Image (spheres, rainbow, N blue to C red):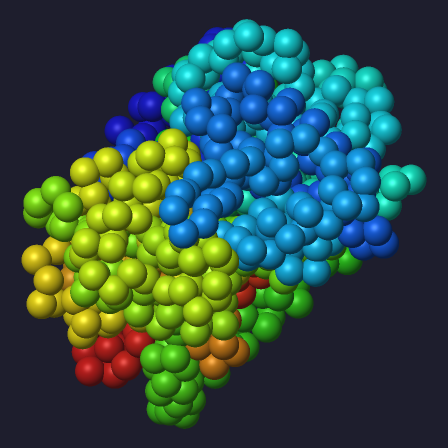
Amino acid sequence: MWNGFYRYVVSYPKLIVVALLIFTVFCTLQLDKLQWETDARVYLPKGHHAIIYDEIVADTFGVKNSILIAVVNETKGIYNAETLNRVARITEQVANLPGVSAGRVIDVMSLSTASAFVGDDESLGSERVMREVPSTEEGFEQLRNTIQRNADLFVGNIISEDGKVAIIRAKLKEGITNRYSTYWAIKTMLDSERGLDSDWSGGWSDSSEWNDGEWDNSKPAVPSMEKESWPNGMKPDDLEKKISADENGDTLYMAGRPVIEVSSGLSALKDIQVMIPLLCIVLCIMLFLFYRTWRGVLIPMLVISCAVIWTMGTMAFLNVPMYTISTMLPVILVAVGIGDSMHVMSRYYDHVLKDPYGQSSEIVTGVMVQLAPPLITTTITTVIGFLALLFSEMPPFKIFGLFTVLGIVYCWLLSVVLVPAILTMMEPKVGDYLKKKRSLRVHDEDSGVARLLTTWGQYSTQNSKMILTVTLLVLIVSAFGASKMYVNSSWMSDFSKESDVSIANDLINKRMDGAIFLNVVVEGKLPGALKSPELLRKIEGMQQQVEKHLLVGDSISIVDYLKSVNKNLHSGDVAYDRLPDTEAEINESLFLLSMSGRPDELDEVIDYDYRQANISFLIKTDETQSLKEIIAEVNEYVEREMSEFDVKVNLAGSANNSYIWAELLIDSQVMAVVLSKIGILIMAIILFRSIIFGLLTVVPVTITTLVIAGGIGLMGIPLDVSTALAAGVAIGVGVDYAVHYLFKYRLERRNLLKHDAATVESMRSVGKTVVFNAAVVTAGFMVLLASQFPPHVKLGAFVSSYMVVSCIAALVLLPLLLTMINSRRQSKVV
């Protein structure tokens, strides 16, 4: 079959090259259609209860993700006319942005929109905290007193305790267009406030209406990284500008979950456009060192370049969005996809050295007929490794797995069709380096690498018991370390400590009550259920209990408003800063609240029939380990203190979503790892037609996974997206080493070589190629260590480690296990 196929390939090489070129051009033209999605909630499955309940909470209480704008004045404090005017001005401008949900005054919350209760023993009302910006010391003092009287509602929320930080919280409409475009518009706005002449809006700020939730390709929310597409000659590096105070001493920051999500996507995009060229340069150097010929460099690079273009072009053509995790796809394809073409080039040069005057078509046909079975086997096993991601509950992981599989298939197709076609059109040739057997002498039978591997092959067949003992000790230590693994993911870990996003987020967490919310919704069965003083006291107790956690800044609920009303009805006497004692008094307070015009703030804590209440906790971290502790505290309190009430308690908000995401991450990746190994085992048994060889195929990657997991656990490194993803990459790629070795070993045994001789020959030939392939892939991923995007750094470090351990495991364990099997079967032919 393969002989006939390659006879066709070598007969029509030009036709094949032209056909593949046309498809490459088509895919290239699709790239401008790539879409982005950075909403953290897309990592949860469609229809997941967390998403559904988030939408219910948003509809009932108007709670949405917010962009936070911090106005900081460390010298004068915010109580000066210029700073307060700036707060009011930014608030008004932000409220007018099409992507901001500003149906209510408090949807853009700041000192200029907040309301406070005022009252005495007979009446209660509400008024704006800052109806107009004061211009006198008396006015500033009055504003300060108003805030202090309502400190439980405002301090830590929209103003810092020391009076030096003011916050503007702007709720966003749903949809990626609104998220990105509002980010750009506010960025332009803040630059204008700083006196910088910039326009990041890309035309969006002039639009009267944005397409809610729908991507409009005519106005890309995410600018291209091409120079001409950035306003006023700006470059991607300008995304991170040094934040400094203006003449009045005001410094402006952007924070909040939408800012983190957008910045993460932009940082990944910016970083990958630096890393891919750097990766290609490193691979070119490695290939040149190995082959010392330009064709040995350019042909493999052409394969991976086309594969990346085909994969991303297919994604764009099918209107599949790019997630932050998808930015790792080109890197993985470049580093991993080069393996097949390297095996072809290595075997091609071996044949040319043996028969330098042979016909190109005959040499290529001979090489490809030999390599076709192991190449398709390694492709299938690699594909199975990534296909396991389709069982993940997270849609972005499914998309990532699917298109990685597609990219790997593209790499294989190009390696077995394009490479032979190109080589057929070229004169058989090797570089002077190979002829003179100098330098690394990669393809010389007596090269240093080949001699080392040959020596190891001989040693392993003679010292199997000692090698087995050392291996078992390593496995015991690894198992102990793996037991100490834990999940702790954080979006903030995507940024360096010096980035604007980290600086702004740290400011909010240190000076204010926190940047993300955990919403706890208490739902009664009947209207008026939340008027019960006993239930309200339990809610107050929950707030007090959970706020004891060091990373919980504050909380707000209907309890806080009722306490504030009670205090104002008693002329501000702090002794009455407590819940009313009876249901009648609570009814009276709620009636007065409704007569006072019911401030918009109440809409976020209680529904109109007093059946549902929302308790919002402000959290100072998004690390899932801490969120797990906080959520456990809530659940334990509900179980212990509220089980007697006929109510349901549900969680929502970005903090809850992050926690659920981490739980799904570990469950999905454990399942993916297990399923991939089962799938590889089944396929290997079918392809090798041997249960023993099937088991031998998965042993090295299984041991590698355990060893790396042990190292992660012993070093206290948490499991997150990068570490979890690295395991999938390693299984998909690391299994190739075992497949190539086993194919060669079985071939030598069928050529009637005894076990020892077959082991040495396999080590000398395929073992050498495995080492070089592992070196190239490792070098490729190590390039990511120079990345400015922490997730890419971690991915590079872990995949590089996996590749090294996978290579060692294959070349140590397979000779060991085959020796043990052979000792029982003696010289029986496998």
Pick the residue in front: 792 or 418.
792
Q: Tell me residue 417's x, y (percent).
A: 44, 25
Q: Tell me residue 372's x, y (percent).
A: 36, 38
Residue at 66% across / 19% down in the picture?
201
Residue at 85% across / 54% down in the picture?
75
Is 598 situated left or right of 276 in this image? left
Q: Is residue 693 visible?
A: no
Residue at 78% across / 51% down in the picture?
77
Q: Tell me residue 763's x, y (percent).
A: 47, 66
Q: Quadrant of the C terminus?
A: bottom left
Pick the residue in front: 589 or 278.
589
Q: Is residue 126 visible?
A: yes
Q: Quadrant of residue 265?
A: top right
Q: Residue furthest right?
A: 247
- Count numbered badges in the picture: 0
* Residue 495, placed above or below residue 390: below
Is 615 situated left or right of 104 in this image? left
Q: Residue furthest front?
A: 122
* Residue 201, placed above or below residue 259: above
Q: Tell me residue 741's x, y (percent).
A: 39, 60
Pick the residue in front: 188 or 2.
188
* Residue 424, placed above or below residue 409: above
Residue at 26% across / 29% down in the picture?
1
Is 705 situated left or right of 24 in this image? left
Is 291 situated left or right of 557 in this image? right
Q: Quadrant of residue 559?
A: bottom left
